[in-house]
Image: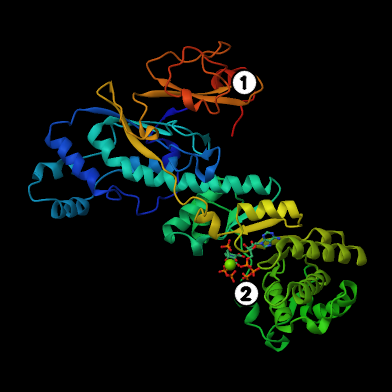
Amino acid sequence: MINRVEISSDRIRNSNSQNGVIQPLLTDLYQINMAYAYWKSGKHDDVAVFDLFFRKNPFQGEFTIFAGLQECLTFLQNFRYSESDIEYLRENMPPTVEPEYFEFLANLTTEEVTVYAVDEGKVVFPRVPLLVLEGPLIVIQLLETTLLTLVNYASLVATNAARYRMAAGRKMKLLEFGLRRAQGPDGGLSASKYAYLGGFDGTSNVLAGKLYNIPVKGTHAHSYISSFSSLDDLHIDTLKHKETGEELSLKEASLRWRSRLADTLNIIQSEASDGELAAFISFAIAFPCGFIALVDTYDVLKSGILNFCAVALGLHDLGYRALGLRIDSGDLAYLSCIARASFTTVAEEYELDWFASLQIIASNDINEDTIISLNEQGHKIDCFGIGTHLVTCQRQPALGCVFKLVEINGEAKIKLSQDMEKITCPGKKSVYRLYGEDGHALIDLMHRTSEEAPSVWEESPVPPSIPGGQESLCEPSQSGTPAQDVLAERGTAAASP
Ligand SMILES: Nc1ncnc2c1ncn2[C@@H]1O[C@H](COP(=O)(O)OP(=O)(O)OP(=O)(O)O)[C@@H](O)[C@H]1O
Ligand SMILES: O=P(O)(O)OC[C@H]1O[C@H](OP(=O)(O)OP(=O)(O)O)[C@H](O)[C@@H]1O
Ligand SMILES: O=C(O)c1cccnc1
Ligand SMILES: [Mg+2]
């Protein structure tokens, strides 16, 4: 399950450019101090093995999605202190530090480091190493903080996104809207990237779309609606018919439809906002093939739905189909049901089947519990736009991945603690995800690399009832239930999380 990966593989060379702040000085000072002390005490040639792992699943959940690997490998491949880095360290470390140390740092690369890793995007469990680094102690020590910062938030957001996906179901469209609320520009970019990895369909973050090839999507804000006060604010109200090219008034068409629809939908036309209608018409003229309207600026039931349907039908007269609407406040379950019922009524009344399946997007402080609650109540939403709680990981703001020394010069090392949770599993380990005959994953089995690999169809001494095999993770395995690789060879579908 945890395989050797090439730091300089094609997938790294071909990967998109890395955020400029990911560089060797993006670390804690104590790493560079330790490296000096190692160097000074002649530990240049010591070979170390470090495990990167977490102790507890986030969000009081049962799983974690591993993310950030590609960024780690790119970082390792490019690892090199620049001249200005060295200059900075020279000026900021104590004057007693020997000048030769800075020469040593200037020539440091990760060439002698071997990386073993779980595939990015896999489901992972506590205590199982996600990354194992083997190589010169000094170099690996210098990598700790950066690797942790690359994996911790990435995996947390990917896990959060996967949980939202599980709550919302496969069919629901999920858009990430979090940039404005993220922990700074960097957090915003990472959130967009790893929410997509965790199962979202797209992002509103344009730079993330460009850098990471994520679909970018967007509607409009309340400011667009409230910038129009009346129909007089419409400077342009015509649009070319999609097929004939004839220039026709979308305003006239929408107004005609609004009068008819007021009867059809039983809404008092005079209570609907003309400013909102003007905003919808102008937005539809700008995006006739992609018209989505935000309908809650004034009143969803008295104004937004009526104005949206009027412009959608006006657009239809001109040969275009609207896409849908977005609701950003109020009771999202109730309002979505009313919106859908209105679409169905219009579809039936005017024999326009497609109108019944217009998209309903909901947003506004949505979190996992909101989605679960909406499902229980029943709703007609097709797409959630989710920002704040997704990117800030409301329920748990950090994942606790750690990076621990487990072997030095072939000798296993342990960290003891009064706190049982903090005791490390010593030694270089291999990890096997064991699958049952039906293709479902049973446990992750971890043992010393020097021990024999588990073999197919041989009984495991590990009780299968232990979830994730976690309590037995430090025990050596003599044999095992069918292993993933062998099942794959036999053509059995291995459970891929
Ligand atoms: N039917 C529902 N069931 C459960 N939660 C809902 C439902 N409808 C909306 N929510 C959630 O309830 C909260 C409503 O928040 P709040 O009262 O601050 O917003 P609002 O008054 O509707 O709109 P705003 O203050 O943004 O104009 C949001 O988190 C929203 O996602
Ligand atoms: O609610 P989130 O999950 O963070 O999703 C993003 C929010 O950002 C936008 O408005 P913004 O919150 O800026 O303004 P608002 O308070 O008027 O909704 C949008 O309309 C959403 O409400
Ligand atoms: O496109 C949207 O509707 C959007 C984008 C960011 C934040 N809120 C909404
Ligand atoms: Mg909001």
What is the x, y in percent for residue 375?
72, 52
On the picture, is 422 further left or further right than 218? left
Q: Is residue 130 above or below residue 290?
A: above
The location of residue 464, given as percent across then percent down, is 57, 21
The residue beneath circle 2 is 222
Q: Looking at the rendered structure, which numbered label has been put on residue 414?
A: none
User: Which residue lies at the image location 69% right of the left edge and 45% below the top edge?
Assistant: 170
Classify mark 1: residues with Cα within 10 Å, few (<14), some (14-19) or many (20+).
Answer: some
Residue in the image at 65% along x and 77% along y: 225
Q: Quadrant of residue 427?
A: top left
Single out the residue that lies furthest toward the front: 418
Local SS, label 2: helix
Where, by quadrant of the figure, is residue 203 drawn? Answer: bottom right
Mark 2 vs 1: CB contact within 8 A = no
- Pointer 2 residue Cβ closer than 8 Å to ligand 2: yes
Q: How many numbered circles does the render carry?
A: 2
Name the one closer to the observer, 489 or 46.
46
Q: Which residue is mark 1?
A: 436
Q: Quadrant of ligand 1?
A: bottom right
Check the image and report above or below for 409 versus 11: above
Q: Earlier in the sequence, mark 2 or mark 1?
A: 2
